[in-house]
């Protein structure tokens, strides 16, 4: 039996993180410069049903059965078997490699799930379509992150910019003109589950204040959608700055993120904001294409541990 492999990109939330968990829209884009890769191969000499997992980036090299039942890999494999109505697996080895920074708001967990689901389902002779891949990856996200919106698994599965509202059909964005983002990693790891739980606790304590912030962000998201579709990407900058102000008020920014946001703006970015759960992780800077390298250098000087320059391409057709 041949080996099967699949890849999945990272993602960045351009507008609307946290508010999206409360029914407001968000915009997310794939980041293909970093990816997760899963490969699956038969192990004919191993006992039937043994699944050996290798994930060097997280120090995993063990039998699936040795992992806790609530481990994401366990949840993923059980969910796939149930979806395919398969009782047990043949002996196999799955290897996961990823260049996506972990706990940085780029969707590393969802990317691993999407790549693994695609590789494993193809290995089993039942390759899944995008809708089923996204749904199964969402089940893993819920077990791992608590109350995620579903935006990570969706944008990573379809690998297209999209406009997303929880529990509604997503909309692929028509990008009229390409635009360039510099993503800067603060080097501070951040738990999405903890950040989401923190916002929920504060929302429960001050529902009116937080609902107003969520509504403010929703207006910005819809304005950004119109701007992307009209082809004037530099106008996204002020909207990003306003979104960042709302995230500050929500309590999910940090001194490290604020320093990078300010450095990006001073270096010539049209706008900048944190992306993802916050309290660490990454910022996004919307930059003039010819200034991407200069702004990336300024962000490194301001304390970023790495940068990624990503171009959101215009829609074809």
Image (cartoon, rainbow, N blue to C red):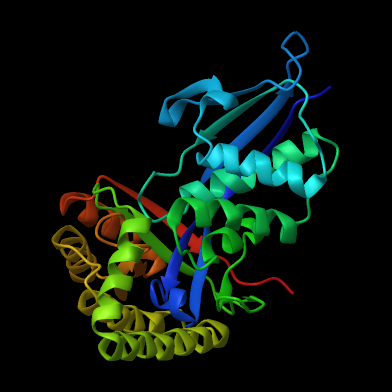
Q: Residue at x 25, y 75 (%)?
A: 202
Q: Quadrant of residue 269?
A: bottom left
Q: Quadrant of the C terminus?
A: bottom right
Residue 32 visible in this rendered orientation of the protein: no
User: Residue 9 location, x and y as percent?
Assistant: 56, 50
Residue toward you, 306 or 180: 306
Give the answer, above or below, for where 174 lies relative to 33: below
Q: Residue furthest top?
A: 45
Residue 231 visible in this rendered orientation of the protein: yes
Residue toward you, 295 or 130: 130
Give the answer, above or below, for where 275 lies relative to 306: below
User: Residue 100 location, x and y as percent?
Assistant: 45, 44
User: Residue 167 location, x and y as percent?
Assistant: 60, 76
Q: Residue at x 23, y 49 (%)?
A: 188
Q: Quadrant of the N terminus?
A: top right
Q: Quadrant of residue 209?
A: bottom left
Q: Residue at x 66, y 39 (%)?
A: 77
Q: Residue at x 53, y 83 (%)?
A: 231
Is residue 41 shown left or right of residue 112?
right
Is residue 104 shown left or right of residue 228?
left
Q: In the rendered picture of this protein, how many numbered marks are placed on residues?
A: 0
Residue toward you, 194 or 243: 194
Give the answer, above or below, for where 72 lies relative to 155: above
Is residue 59 shown left or right of residue 247?
right
Is residue 35 shown left or right of residue 38?
left
User: Residue 132 location, x and y as percent?
Assistant: 73, 57
């Amino acid at each position: 039996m041949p080996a099967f492999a699949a890849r999945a990109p990272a993602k960045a939330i351009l507008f609307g993180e946290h508010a999206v968990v409360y029914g407001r829209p968000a915009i997310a884009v794939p980041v293909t410069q970093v990816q997760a890769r899963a490969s699956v191969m038969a192990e004919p000499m191993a006992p039937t049903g043994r699944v050996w997992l290798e994930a060097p980036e997280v120090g995993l090299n063990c039998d699936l059965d040795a992992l806790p039942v609530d481990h994401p890999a366990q949840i993923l494999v059980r969910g796939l078997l149930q979806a395919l109505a398969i009782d047990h697996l043949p002996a196999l080895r799955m290897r996961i490699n990823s260049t996506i920074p972990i706990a940085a708001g780029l969707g590393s967990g969802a990317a691993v799930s999407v790549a693994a689901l695609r590789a494993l389902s193809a290995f089993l002779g039942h390759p899944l379509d995008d809708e089923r891949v996204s749904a199964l990856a969402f089940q893993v996200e819920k077990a791992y992150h608590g109350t995620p919106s579903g935006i990570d698994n969706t944008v990573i599965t379809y690998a297209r910019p999209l406009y997303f509202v929880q529990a509604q059909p997503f909309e692929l964005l028509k990008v009229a003109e390409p635009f360039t983002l510099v993503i800067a990693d603060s080097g501070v790891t951040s738990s999405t589950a903890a950040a989401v739980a923190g916002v929920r606790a504060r929302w429960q304590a001050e529902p009116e204040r937080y609902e107003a912030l969520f509504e403010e962000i929703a207006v910005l998201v819809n304005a950004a959608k119109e701007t992307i579709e009209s082809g004037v990407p530099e106008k996204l900058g002020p909207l990003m700055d306003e979104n960042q102000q709302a995230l500050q008020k929500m309590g999910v920014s940090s001194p490290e993120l604020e320093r990078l946001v300010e450095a990006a703006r001073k270096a010539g970015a049209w706008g900048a904001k944190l992306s993802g759960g916050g309290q660490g992780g990454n910022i996004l800077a919307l930059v003039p294409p010819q200034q991407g390298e200069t702004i990336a250098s300024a962000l490194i000087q301001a304390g970023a541990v790495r940068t990624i320059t990503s171009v959101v391409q215009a829609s074809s057709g």
